[in-house]
Image (cartoon, rainbow, N blue to C red):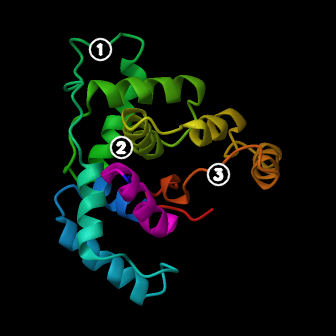
Amino acid sequence: MTTQKGAQRRQRRRISGEIEDRIAVLAQREPRWSAGQIYEQLLLEYDENKLKTPPPSKRTVERIVKEWRGVDLTGPWNLYTAAPEDVPLVLPVLAAVINWTQGAITSLTNGEARIIANIRSVAPDFGLVDSFLWARLYRRRIENNEPTDDFDAYLSYAPWRNAERHGAYQRAVMLGWVRPVPRAFIVNDDGEVTTS
C-alpha cells in the first residue's frame, strides 16, 4: 500500500530539480506573490529560455509554494532572546534579506537565526542571502527528516573561496563522494541567483 507521503515523493521526483529549486527561490524572494503569480513567472522564464524544462501544473506549484511557506514554530527572533554571539552573525543577513525582498520579509525566526549563525560562524564569507535561503531549506529538510549532507559538504569544501577549493568540490561531486547542492541556492553579490 502506498502512503500519501510516498506518492508525493514519487511525484516530486518527476519535477525537474531546476524547476523545484526555482519555485523555492521565488517563494522566498517574493513572499507577497501568490502561487499563481509564481506559476506565471515560471511560464515566462520558460518562454524566454531561462528554464530548460517546462513548469509543472499550477496545482503542483501551489503545493510546493505551500510547503516552502510552511509555519516555523520556533518563534520570532529578536535581540532580547538572542544569544549575544549570534547577533553580529544574524543582523547583516536580516538587512540583506530586507533589501533582497524589498521589505516583504523583515524578520527571521529563531530556527532560521540559529542556522544562519551556525553557517556564518564557519563561513563568514558566505553570501548573506545565501545564508538565509540555506537556513530555510535546511530547516525544512530537518523538519521533513531529509538529508542535509549536500549543504554540509558544500560548506566544508567552501568552493566559493578559491579555484583550488572549487576544483576539489567539483571533483568530489563528479566522483560521487558528495551530492551537489541545488543550483538555485547560489546567489551572487548582486542578489541574483547564479547557475554555477
Residue kind at label 1, given as amino acid type: Ala
Inter-mark Cα distance, 3 to 1: 32 Å
Q: Nearer the viewer, mark 2 or mark 3?
A: 3
Q: Percent x, y for residue 73?
A: 21, 28
Camera sees residue 189: no
Quadrant of the image occupied by residue 81: top left
80 over 24 or under it: above or below? above
Q: Residue at x 61, y 42 (%)?
A: 150
Q: Quick one: label 2 or label 1, which is nearer the N terminus?
A: 1
Please state the extent of the stretch shown in magenta in the rendering: 3-20
Residue carrying label 1: 82
Identify residue for label 2. Answer: 96
Residue shown at the point (45%, 42%) measured from the top left: 134
- The kind of residue on which mark 2 rests is Ala
Is 18 located above or below residue 113 in the figure? below
For disc 2, the neighbor class at 10 Å (few under 14, some 14 to 19, many from 20) is some
Q: Residue at x 36, y 43 (%)?
A: 96
Q: Amino acid at mark 3?
A: Pro
Task: First in sequence, mark 2 or 3: give its number.
Answer: 2
Principal secondary structure, stretch drawn in magenta: helix
- Which numbered tag is attached to residue 169? none
Q: Secondary structure at mark 2?
A: helix
Q: Position of residue 68 (x, y in %)?
A: 30, 50
Quadrant assignment, res 178: top right
Which of the two discs, 3 and 1, labels the residue nearer the N terminus? Answer: 1
Label 3: which secondary element? loop
**Within-10-Å neighbours for mark 1: few <14, some 14–19, many 20+:** some
- Residue 18 in percent (x, y) is at 50, 67
Residue extending farthest to the bottom is 47
Mark 3 sits on what residue?
180
